[in-house]
Amino acid sequence: MATGRTHRPATRSRGIPEATVARLPLYLRALTALSERSVPTVSSEELAAAAGVNSAKLRKDFSYLGSYGTRGVGYDVEYLVYQISRELGLTQDWPVVIVGIGNLGAALANYGGFASRGFRVAALIDADPAMAGKPVAGIPVQHSDDLEKIIEDNGVSIGVIATPAGAAQPVCDRLVAAGVTSILNFAPTVLSVPDGVDVRKVDLSIELQILAFHEQRKAGEEAAAGSDGAGPAAARGVSGPASSSTSADQGPDGDVPAVMPA
Ligand SMILES: NC(=O)c1ccc[n+]([C@@H]2O[C@H](COP(=O)([O-])OP(=O)(O)OC[C@H]3O[C@@H](n4cnc5c(N)ncnc54)[C@H](O)[C@@H]3O)[C@@H](O)[C@H]2O)c1
């Protein structure tokens, strides 16, 4: 669901394209599910289907990792989990701060999925003095006056911004000045950051708007098919890259990367 930009070139220094990096978490999620079921090996087709990615793309992505699988056997699940985790830097603990502990920040703090993936919520920060000291998800909220000290004390390099849009840029500037080099921004605003700082932006309303576009398109196709006398299935079959479900043109999240008006 994440969309975003980074300030790194399209190919990282170690030669792995950004698009491949964006798919690695999808492979990892699918592989982790296989690992939990003690599945020892997986074919590229099975894994591609589980990750929602085209299998040729998967093989190409894995070639960047130097992982080619064994013909007739497939890929070793545990080894791939290790390899991708290492590539993504998940074999180490990443302390994260969340700034803005309202509805969203509190929900994020309570989300167990961060810790299980190596992201430890080291601190919660909010500007509201009334919140200072109150525990959220078992962690006392700290006042934003102390932001710089909190970043330094916890060795934080990843910050999550869940403040109102108007506060996001000043919060971002303070995080960056304090040493944070990666930001996950939930506020509906574009952040400016210096070179060397990565920003990922999550905006669920944008995802919903894209779904609305597809809904509108499907409705139009079905109406057109109805007036042609053809069924809706036939209409979907000719609808091109924005139709809903073939994997070959799908983006890293299984979405459609370039949405073109019909
Ligand atoms: N990306 C998404 O999909 C998505 C979804 C929901 C909400 N949002 C956005 O997330 C943000 C938070 O939404 P919410 O519903 O939790 O709002 P909220 O009003 O419940 O919480 C905002 C919190 O930020 C704190 N805050 C304000 N200024 C601050 C500052 N300078 N430093 C630190 N803390 C500060 C406030 O005290 C408050 O506790 C909003 O920008 C909202 O638009 C994004």
Image: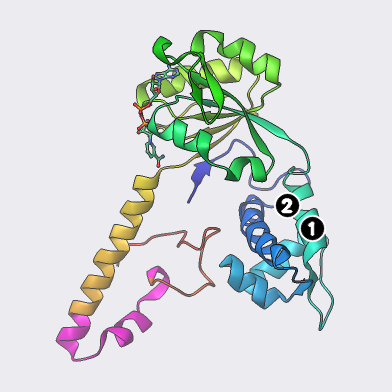
37 left or right, relative to 198: right
Query: Which residue reaches farthest bottom?
Result: 229
Measured as percent of width and height from the top left, residue 25 is found at 64, 53
Q: Are marks 1 and 2 in contact (CB under 8 Å)?
A: yes
Q: At 64% across and 63% down in the image, what residue appears?
A: 30
94 left or right, relative to 255: right
Taking 176 as reference, is 46 above or below it?
below
**Badge number at residue 254:** none
Looking at the image, tell me whether mark 1 or mark 2 is earlier in sequence order.
2
Does residue 178 show up?
A: no
Q: At 23% across and 78% down in the image, what residue appears?
A: 222
Measured as percent of width and height from the top left, residue 146 is found at 56, 9
Stretch of the chain drawn in magenta: 224-242
**Badge number at residue 16:** 2
Which amino acid does the dot numbered 2 rest on? Ile
Residue 241 on the magenta span: yes
Residue position marked by numbered label 1 in the rendering: 65
Residue 131 on the magenta span: no
- Local secondary structure at mark 2: loop
Disc 1 beta carbon < 8 A from ligand 1?
no
How crowded pointer 2 is (Cα within 10 Å; few <14, some 14-19, many 20+) is rated as some
Measured as percent of width and height from the top left, residue 259 is found at 39, 60
**Viewer-nearest of labels 1 and 2?**
1
Residue nearest the observer in this picture, 171 or 31: 31
Which amino acid does the dot numbered 1 rest on? Leu
Quadrant in the picture for the C terminus: bottom left
Ligand 1 position by quadrant: top left
